[in-house]
Image (cartoon, grey):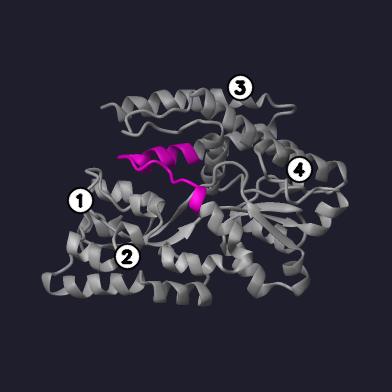
Amino acid sequence: MKISLYGHGPIISETGSTWMSSLAGQNCLRPFTMNEAAAIGGADKFLPAAWQSCIDFDNETILAIPWTLNTYLAYYRRDLFGQAGVDESSAFSSLEAFAGTLGDLQKAGVEIPLAIPTTGNSVSVLHNASSFVWKMGGELITPDGKKVLFSNPGTLAGLEAYFGLYKFLPPAARNLTDEACINAYLEGRTAMTLRSPDLLGQINRKTAERISQNTGIAMQPGTPFVGGSNLIVWKHVQPVQEAIAVKLVRYLSSTENMVTQFREIGYIPANLEALNQVEREKTYIPLTQSLKIGRALQRVPLWGLVEDKLVKALNHIWQIIFATPEPNVGRIIEDTLLPLEERLNNTLSQ
């Protein structure tokens, strides 16, 4: 934000794809010309959901080049699934099947069936909730960004299904941060967690063989969220630096470089040729399937404002649910989000 406001600092940056709306609105990015984009590969070279985040609101100007991808996967312990009689092939086939799986684990005496972040204003709460909302036919905001849709029936139904997971979060699994969820899984204290591909890398690199072999991976239930990061060139770039900056972006986003980064660092490439090479490895099939059928958050002006308020509200809902005996989840959601909807719509409509 300081770079965008004051117009000095690095020439090239990596930025989260959901930040693009805010940056585009500040007129602080140096666009790529059509010839530069064509030399890099153009839209056909990248995952469509990733490429769309790089386009300005005129749907023509190219403000960034996709670099890495992110989504959420279900990580689960095969031994506990077996003890509970859960069929891995159908455990995540629908939101109803997912809830049934958690119920079976609970009935089988698994102390913590699920670990998901519910505190610390984690943006993961929004990403996880979105997959439930989209599966129920809901939306968070209109395509033009003029109105949030928290009161949409599909949106409310999706959120009620998501927050209904509280039944499977015993006291030891409440108020967990992103890091605490990862540790709970790596330490064997939970049967399942919903996390990004980073956890897969940690399992492969840092854990005992027994944990790696006992870990199953599946697509997250619902409609998967797709995020990631893009490469941008700041508008304050000097003319003498422009060609060099574009050349570096071209190199960083190339198939060869992205395959190398995947092998050595675990970055999931937005470059489709590189992503197809990732898919050849059986372990990563659920990941690539999730990316190809998933969707990104709406690319609209002022999304940064909406996201900030919504993330705080969703985390607050968790706190109310945990503090309420036998909570009426639907009522808590409406009491929290409908006033926020009214305030945000007053701002967005101006």
Please report contact status of discs 1 and 2: CB closer than 8 Å, yes or no.
no
The stretch in magenta equals 292-311
Please report contact status of discs 4 and 1: CB closer than 8 Å, yes or no.
no
Going 50% across and 47% down the picture, which residue do you hit? 294
Please state which of residues 16 and 49 is positioned toward the viewer in this rendering. Answer: 49
Q: Where the C terminus falls, by quadrant? A: top left
Cα distance between the residues tagged 3 and 1: 41 Å
Q: Is residue 71 visible to us here?
A: no
Tell me the residue that label 2 is attached to.
Answer: 13
Residue farthest to the left? Answer: 239
Cα distance between the residues tagged 3 and 2: 43 Å
Residue 274 included in the magenta stretch of the image? no
Q: Mark 4 Cα within 10 Å, few/some/many (few <14, many 20+)?
A: many
Residue 331, numbered circle: 3
Judge from the rendering whether residue 149 lies leftward or rightward of residue 283; answer left or right. Answer: left
Q: Quadrant of residue 211?
A: bottom right
Q: Quadrant of residue 147?
A: top left
Amino acid residing under circle 4 = Leu
Q: Earlier in the sequence, mark 4 or mark 1?
A: 1
Question: Element type at marker 4?
Answer: helix
Q: Quadrant of residue 51?
A: bottom left
